Amino acid sequence: MAVSTSAPVDLSAALVLTPTSAAEWLVVLPVAWCLAVGALLMMLRRWAILQPVIALAALAVLVLIDVALLDHVARNGPTTMVMGRWLPPFGIAFTVDLTGALFALMAAAVAFAAGIFSLADINESGRRYGFYPLLMLLMAGVSGAFLTGDIFNLYVWFEVLLISSFGLLVLGSEREQIDGTVKYGFLNLVATTLFLVATGFLYAVFGTLNMADIARKADELRAGAPLMTLVGLYVLAFGMKAAAFPVNFWLPASYHTPRVVVSALFAGLLTKVGIYALIRVTVMLFPVEREELSFVLALIGALTMMVGVLGALAQTDFRRILGYLVVSGIGSMVAGIAIGGPGGIGGAIFYALHSMLVMTGLYFASGIAMRLGADSSISTLAGLYRKHVGFAALTLMLCFAVSGLPPFSGFWPKVMLVKAALDIGAWWLAAALLLVGFFTMIATGRLFLLAYWRESTRPDAGGTTRLPAKTFGPLAALTLLALALGVYPEPLLAMIQNAAAGLAEPSAYLNSVFPAGGPQ
């Protein structure tokens, strides 16, 4: 009888042999959940009446999953799960730290509010043509981008959200939507191509795509590798995704064309994915190169802020004004990345989370205003406060928030960024931040005075109007949350400071992927 003489294989050198804990499943659950529900909605696409019910329940569950994930990371530090049990850097890693968990939770909350608003904004035709499956696919891409620990998979999740965003943009098939989609699609495809080229370049230099592995190898390769070129490509690609100057013109040309709820989702989520990627790559992976590019980033941030707010002042269309305000906010976040340090990075993270809430709420307000006034131009809209005082009050609060006025959520990141700029002697950048805040206040004040406060001369102006809960409720919830974060910011500020510290000193992140004593 033949006897095997082969030695037993030591799988511990290649595979994770310990059972996967429930907490580790939390890392991938947001993505898996969104994909599973999206597939279910596709199978039930002929049952239009079930689409919003299933999607809203799924988005509520997604919020709970992200709350549990944030709680776990806040208590236990960064958590990693590797696909197929292969040890990193060979297995595809999902690694979540406080930064990723905060972004994922805020994205889920915004998507849930948008799901409720869609009950009034998406008709039966939109349901049959796939709004809710596309929404779940979009959230799968957004969640995957925030939670992945592999830079090629960051590219993959960008592609997922890009594909779903194309479908959402053209929903309705109107001429203006097609035109906006072409502009949106061309620039984003160029940015995606640059991202892929940079990632291929990165793999040629590092021989790995795992973010933790790149971070720990960067110091060794810095002397002989063209890392500045590599980082420059990433800055350009992510700058285009985030709509930073000078590649920001696609956003105001496209965000006013789709359904209001789609515009709100895009304003709240998509540009923030670009900012998140820029923070992750420049702050955690290549901090030395970020420092060398700090003046260029500061200049880009200042120009983006100014172009955005001046564009808002020049517009009369409600949603075009908001599109330029999105661009202006991106400039503040880029300025925070340029400043660096706990104050700058923390301010950029806080500003991004605040912008998710407030810009989504303002787009909701634009949709309600267009229904009440039967127009989208602030030169025609008038007397909206008479139609619904509560709606006017909520819009005014959001205008204060986006302008960085207390006691709303935009005040604290603005203070953090100005202080951080002054601390490093960048007085001109601090002045730009304050000046843009002043101009934003003028732009939003002009919007409110013309569209809301001015008396209407139209014969059909009428009296007060009741707003359905499915439109007023999401707007009120986001506004009150922005107020709560302004009045009591301490818990969020503490997490943001820890998140910024974790990016600047990513030892906990690295240890999560490569535990001490494990394979190197």
Image (cartoon, rainbow, N blue to C red):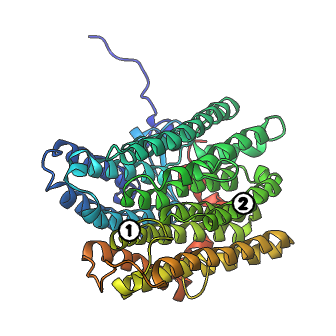
Residue 370 numbered tag: 1
Q: How many marks?
A: 2
Q: Quadrant of the C terminus?
A: top right
Using the image, determine if residue 461 lies above or below residue 296. Answer: below
Q: Kindly identify the residue that appears in the image at 42 percent across and 20 percent down.
A: 6
Query: Residue 131 at x, y = what percent?
Result: 29, 50
Furthest residue to the top? 1
User: At x 69% / y 78%, what residue is drawn?
Assistant: 438
* Mark 1 closeness class: few <14, some 14–19, many ≥20 residues within 10 Å: some
Left or right for 418, reference 360: right
Residue 264's disc is none
Left or right: where does residue 281 sit relative to residue 37?
right
- Name the image quarter holding residue 110: bottom left
> Up-down: is 273 above or below 14?
below
Q: Nearer the viewer, residue 198 or 224?
A: 198
In the rendering, at what x and y percent does residue 519 appear? Answer: 57, 42
Q: Callout 1, which amino acid?
A: Met
Say which of marks 1 and 2 sits in front.
1
Residue 161: percent from the left, percent from the top? Answer: 43, 46
Left or right of residue 454, residue 110 in this image: left
Relative image position of residue 412 (x, y in whole percent): 62, 80
Residue where numbered disc 2 is placed: 301
Quadrant assignment, res 191:
top right
Question: Regarding mark 2 in the picture, which secondary structure is present there?
Answer: helix
Q: Nearer the viewer, residue 134 or 475?
A: 475
Q: Amino acid at mark 2?
A: Gly
- Along the line of sight, which residue is nearer the eye, 98 or 6? 98
Camera sees residue 165: no
Q: CA distance from mark 1 to mark 2?
A: 32 Å
Q: Nearer the viewer, residue 301 or 82?
A: 301
